[in-house]
Image (tube, rainbow, N blue to C red):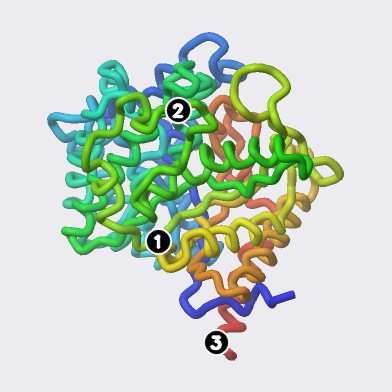
Amino acid sequence: MPDRYDLPTGFRWGAATAAYQIEGAVTEDGRGPSVWDVFAARPGAVRDGHTGAVACDHYHRYPEDIALMKNLGLDGYRFSIAWPRVLPTGSGPVNPAGLAFYDRLVDALLDAGITPLPTLFHWDLPQALEDGGGWLNRDTAHHFADYAAIVTDRLGDRVPAWITLNEPFVHTVFGYALGTHAPGRTLMLEALPAAHHQLLAHGLAASILHDRGLEVMLSNNLTPVEPATPSDADLAAAQAYDALHNRLFTDPVLLGRYPDLSALGVPDDLYGAIHPGDTDLIAAPGLDGLGLNFYNPTRIAAPTEPGLPFDFVDIPDVPHTAFGWPVVPDALRQLLLNLRDTYGKSLPPITITENGCSVTESTTPDQPRIDFMSAHLDALAAAIAEGVDIRGYYTWSLLDNYEWAEGYHQRFGLIHVDFATQQRTPKASYTWYRDLIAAHRTHRSRS
C-alpha cells in the first residue's frame, strides 16, 4: 500500500463549506433571498422545517472559525460566495456590504496562512432569477458571467484559483428534476436544459477569469457506476446512468461534446437548450483543474418498471454512513483511474474538493469518520502511485452545518456545532486530521 504521507510536494490539505449551509444572516446587510430561503420556508420541504436563516452564524463568527482552521493546519479553505449577498436580485446593482464581507474573509484567511479557494455557485441562486426561469433560462448563464466578473474584480488580486460551479449534476437532478432540493421543480429529464445552462455559465465565466490571469476549476460530483450483474441489460442500464451522472458534466468541458444520451430518450439538443457554438463556449476556456467531490459508488440494474432506463441497487455487505450511503473507499481509486483512462491528456490535475461522511452525533469517539477519511486517503495515495495527478484533498466538512433537505440532522463536520448556542467543539476526527497534516509536513521536510 502506498504511504499516504508520501504525497506530491505542494499537496494541499483543506476543508470545505458552502455559504447557505454555514453563513446564516440571510436578511442582513442587504442580502437578497435565495431559492433555498424560499424552498426551506415551504411546509414539508425540509426535514422538521429547518432553514439556513442562522445555520452556523459564520457570517458573524468567521474569525473564530478561521482560528480553528489555523489550529488544524489547513493549507486551503474551500468556501462559496453567496450570489444573493453580492447581487441581491442576481443582476443589477452590487451590494457593497456583501462584497465587503468576502473581502474581510479573504484577508483573514490570508493572515492565517490559509489559501482561499472560493466557489462562485453552490446552489443558492438569487430567487429573483428563479422567478424568471432560473437555470432553465439561458439568460441566467450570462448573469452568472457578470457576477463572476464583479467578484473576481474585487478579490482576484488575492485569490489565484476559483471554482465556478459546485455539483451541477446534483443541483439539476435534485433541484429541477426530482424537486427534493431548491427550487423544487419536478421536470424529470426535461430538467436537462438546466444542466446545459450551468455548463454554459461555467464556460462564459471561465473565459472572464482566464482573461484576468486566474485559474479555473469546476467541481463535479462523480461516482463509479457498476452493473448489478454482468447481464447485457444491467450493463446497458449502468452505461446510461454513467452518461447522465458523470459524462454529461465532464465530456462537454474536457472533450467539447456531450455524451450519447439516446438511451435516456433525450434529444441531441437537450430539448432545444443547445445553440450553435455552445459546446465551443463551454470547452474553449479549458480547465486548470478538475474538482472531484466523492462520497460513494453507484450500483445500477435494468429497470423493473417503465420510466428511466435504470434502477438503483444497494451495495450489500459494506458499511453505510448515517446518511445511508455505502462506504467503499477503493471506489475512489477506481474512479480516479477511470478518469485518467477516459480523458487521457485532456484530464487536468485533480483536486478532491469534497470527501467525508455523516456520523450520528452519539457515535463516540467519532471513529467512523476517522476510518472513512483514512481509508479514502489510502485510496487517493494508491491512485497517485498509479499515475493520477492529484494536487489536494479538501474534506467535507469543516463544521456541522445545514445539510440541505435534511436540515440539521446529518453531521459531516470535523467540528461539532451546538446550533442552539453556536458553541464549536472539535471532534476526534479534527485532532486526527490535524495530526495527519502535521505528520505529512514533517515527512516532506525530511525527504
- Residue placed farthest to the bottom in the image? 447
Q: Nearer the viewer, mark 3 or mark 2?
A: 2
Q: Quadrant of residue 370?
A: bottom right
Q: Tell me if residue 182 can be seen.
A: no
Q: Relative to 285, is 90 above or below? A: above
Q: Secondary structure at mark 2?
A: loop
Reading the chain from its start, which is encountered first: label 3 or label 1? 1
- Residue placed farthest to the front in the image? 232
Reading the chain from its start, which is encountered first: label 2 or label 1? 2
In which quadrant will I find the N terminus? bottom right
Relative depth, front residue between 157 and 198: 198
Q: Please, what is the three-letter code of the amino acid marked with disc 3?
A: Ser
Q: Please, what is the three-letter code of the amino acid marked with disc 2?
A: Val
Q: Tell me if residue 134 can be seen.
A: yes
Q: Which residue is mark 3?
A: 445
**Label at residue 10:** none
Mark 3 → mark 1, Cα distance in angstroms? 26 Å
- Indicate left or right for 299 with 342 as reference: right
Number of marks drawn: 3
Q: Please, what is the three-letter code of the amino acid marked with disc 1?
A: Gly
Q: Secondary structure at mark 1?
A: strand
Q: Which residue is mark 1?
A: 289
Q: Which residue is mark 2?
A: 266
